[in-house]
Every structure is written in structure tokens, then in C-alpha cells.
Image (cartoon, helix red, strand yellow):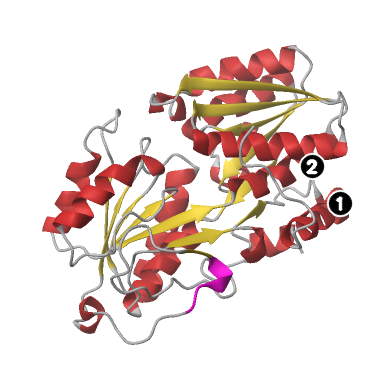
Amino acid sequence: MLGKRFNRMAIGSVAGVMLMAVAACGGSGGGTTASEAPSSAGASSEASKGGLKVGLAFDVGGRGDKSFNDAAYAGLEKAKTDLSADIKELSPAADGSNRGDLLRQLADAGYNPIIGVGFAYGDDIKKTAAEYPDIQFAVVDSASNGPNVTGLLFAEEQGSYLAGVAAATKSKSNHVGFVGGVENDLIKKFEAGFVAGVKSVKPDAKIDIKYLTPDGDFTGFKAPDKGKVAAEKMYQDGADIVYHASGDSGLGVFQAAAAAKKKAIGVDSDQRQTVKETDLQGVIMTSMLKRVDVGVFEFIKAFQGGAKGGSNITYDLKVDGVGLSTTGGEIEDIKDKLDAAKKDIVDGKITVPSKP
């Protein structure tokens, strides 16, 4: 069941989600989906001391973005509640220039494991992990690049495909839009999946696409004013539903949707629940859920059980690592169509593109 299962699923309940215990395999190691990763045996030296200290370094925007970072924090907070972990989170400067410093601060303070939220931590994690070989690291949205680094990856294109199916089915104008925060390979996965999903339902649909900043300029994830301007133009041109993958900039998309009396699709978290502005909640038809909370929590839980790094774990539709929220009930009437699309992807009948 596509929607209700997501809303009621507790963090960490994804069937079979355990990190692969790979000892000293080096490099990026092998990849696996979360459902295929075996559990590890034994207890880590850190856990055996009874001192589970988990550090997390946010991406640009930090805690409170109602999206990607907040999803990661939900997993960290669950580790505190369920695993009695001592937790610490740090946020980078606006330009993200001190990511490496944050990781070293956590390492020097005795935190193990340490998680970097976002692909931009890839190089910094690689360097820091080499400096602290006895500490386990994880990086969200970037592949493992060391024997003590776990890559937590997500099939964003698959969840975005379902968002595209929903948008095309619900659109009355045969015209939808996509707002991306930064024009890089990761966000292009969202675009590619969304466009494919829309076209699967309405091949002749018009799709407006706008990125807020070029690759390398991460301010696009924290620019609600730019998100609003981009979405306003799409609504004025006839789009009636706009999907965003732009972090905190999505607030501007929702504001534009409210002003135009149109609909929007959120991202990462169930944004109809996380957006505090009550006048904006109703414009969010659904959100593409990216279960960063699950990935973070399961990594911590597996570390406590003795798992080591050097591998990648992919959270896809097969393990409900991505999907759609159903808060508000606005996609309940098309549930059968969404379930069918999900099944075809899981069964391999549909291969969703990851590049536009």
C-alpha cells in the first residue's frame, strides 16, 4: 500500500534495513539495496563501552529547513530515544566552507559514528575518515570512499516518478512545473524521474523546468525568494501543479501556489505536516518522501551492532526508502494508479531514468 504505509511507518521499520558489515574492504566497496544488506554480528568496541556518541553535521540550511536536514535530525533524535545515544549536531556556514572543520570537531570530541548530511560532504568525509581511521562515518547522497565510510544513497528518481504520475493525473491544465534548487547531478535525478512520470500519463503535457542556482552554488537550497519567483512564473504561464526539489527554497514555491490558488508537491519530508504556516499546508497536494530519517537511524543502529563501513546502501521503492505522503487525502482517489506504477518499478517493468 503506497500512501498509508508511509504515514504510519515508524522510523526504522523498513523491512530488512541493516547496513552491510564489511571489514576493511577499502575504497567505495560494493553496493547493495537496503533490503539486501545483511545484519552484522557482535558489538562494536564503542557500543561495548556503553558510550554511544553520535555526531551529525547538517548540510547548508541546517536544522529547521522542514525538509532534508530535518529528516536527518529525526533519525538522529530516534537514536537518542531508542538507542540511548548521546547526540550532537552542527550546522555549516552559509557557504558550507567549514564542513571539514565540523567533522573534525565531532571526531576530536569523541563522537563515533559521525554522519555528514548531503553529497557536498563527500570529499571532506574522505579526508577526515582517513585522518580518523578508528571512527566510522556515513555520508548521505554520496558513495563510500573509504573503509570506514558508509554511503547512504536514495533512489530519488523513483519517488519523483510517482510524483510525476500524481501531478499529471491531477493536472487540469495539462501543464506542470519543476523547481530545482541547484542544477547538479543529484537534483537532476528528481527532474528526470518527475518528467518520466508525467510523460507516462500524459505524453503531450507541458513541463516547465527552472533551477535556482548553477552547480556549485548551494544558495539555491536556501532562497525562498527565488523559489517564489520561479513558481510564480510557472503558475502565470498556466501550470497548475509545481514540484520542487529545492530545500528551504520550497517555502517560496508554496507561497506562490497559495497566491495563485494552485497546487504544489513537496519533497524529502511530509511537508504538509512540517510547514508551520497553516495557510500554506493546504496547497501541498503530496510530498515525495526521501527517508533520510530511516537511513540515518539504521546506520546508527547497525554501528551499535558492530557494522563497519566501506559499502553503499541504497534506499529505493522496494524498501519504501522513497515514496509519496498521503496527508490531506488528495491522492487517495488515484491510489490504484500509483500502486500500479510502484509495482512496475519494483518488478523491473519500468526503469526510471536518473538523468534528464
Numbered mark located on residue 273 in the image: none
Disc 2 crowd rating (10 Å Cα; few below 14, some 14-19, many 20+) is: many
Residue 197, compared with residue 229, is above or below; it is below
Coordinates of residue 237 in the picture (x, y in percent): 75, 12
Q: Amino acid at mark 1?
A: Lys
In the image, 116 versus 72, the foreground residue is 116
Say whether disc 1 or disc 2 marks the residue closer to the N-terminus.
Answer: 2
Q: Residue at x 23, y 84 (%)?
A: 48
Q: Which residue is mark 1?
A: 337
Secondary element at image label 2: helix
In which quadrant will I find the C terminus? top right
- Which span is picked out in magenta? 33-38
The image shows residue 136 at horizontal and vertical percentages of 27, 64
- Residue at the spot x=84%, y=56% of the render? 340
Image point (37%, 44%), residue name = 63
- Look at the numbered discs 1 and 2 and tell me whether their residues touch, using CB distance below 8 Å: yes
Q: Nearer the viewer, residue 283 or 120?
A: 120
Badge 1 density bin: few <14, some 14–19, many ≥20, Cα 10 Å: some
Q: Which residue is mark 2?
A: 165
Residue 37 located within the stretch drawn in magenta: yes
Among the 4 quarters of the image, the one containing residue 211: top right
Report, in whole angstroms, how far the alpha carbon at label 1 lies from the one at label 2. 8 Å
Residue type at mark 2: give it. Answer: Val
Q: Quadrant of the N terminus?
A: bottom right
Give the residue at x 59% y 74%.
15
Which x, y percent locates residue 93?
26, 33
Q: Is residue 284 visible?
A: no
Q: Does the magenta run of residues contain 253?
A: no
